[in-house]
Image (spheres, grey):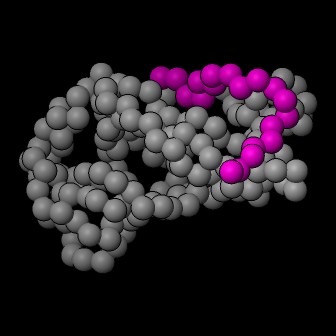
Amino acid sequence: MMKVIHEGNPGTKRLLIKNGKLNDYMIDDLNGRRMNREGNGACRRQNYRFVPTSRMSNTYICNGKSTPEEIIKATKLGLYAVGFNGGSVDPTTGEFNFGCSEAYIIRDGKIAEPVKGATLIGKGFEILKKIDMVANDLDLAQGMCGASSGSIRTNVGQPTLRVSEVTVGGRGGELK
């Protein structure tokens, strides 16, 4: 069993982004002193061998007002990514890549043929600005957050959402 060590501060709900604007930060005590703010329970590490740092704990996107069916119907041409099989994020640049384990083309508001080997690529801060529809079907799951302060269990989740533009990598032809 993995034991996670924290700074001893109680965790609190941190609403990081609200209505498209940065609202709060994940702050450990050390960086809180640097920022002239109090730590808010975001400091974590795998065990005593690792230096503690600000880390995600329960990170998710809140429910929106659309249904998943409304989002699909409103999409003329797109990629419907149902499942992911891993990826990575560079915390210094926000660049990410996530492989799709299950994905389909959306054509004229309908789910069409399956897509194999698609990878979503981009920068987190840019993609967040391109979310234009959010559904009401939030789903949480357990994952792992790996960083210089060790590998830690975390809960993550999001409802169905639509991103107006994202780079999709993989082998194959042009989407028509």
Q: Quadrant of residue 89?
A: bottom right
Percent across and percent down for residue 103 are: 26, 58
Horizontally, residue 116 falls left or right of residue 74, namely: right
Percent across and percent down for residue 53 are: 80, 45
- Region in magenta: 1-19
Residue 168: tell me if it is visible.
no
Q: Quadrant of residue 163?
A: top left
Q: Nearer the viewer, residue 141 or 81?
A: 141
Horizontally, residue 108 falls left or right of residue 158, namely: left
Percent across and percent down for residue 119 are: 39, 65
Residue 166: tell me if it is visible.
yes
The correct choice, above or below, for 73 with respect to 97 in the image is above
Q: Quadrant of residue 43?
A: top right
- The secondary structure making up most of the magenta span is loop
Q: Residue at x 68, y 22 (%)?
A: 12
Q: Residue furthest front?
A: 1
User: Is 15 contained in the magenta span?
Assistant: yes
Percent across and percent down for residue 61 are: 46, 32
Q: Residue at x 76, y 50 (%)?
A: 46
- Dividing the image into 4 quarters, which one contains the C terminus? bottom left
User: Is 94 contained in the magenta span?
Assistant: no
Q: Residue at x 33, y 66 (%)?
A: 118
Q: Residue at x 69, y 55 (%)?
A: 151
Q: Nearer the viewer, residue 165 or 148?
A: 148
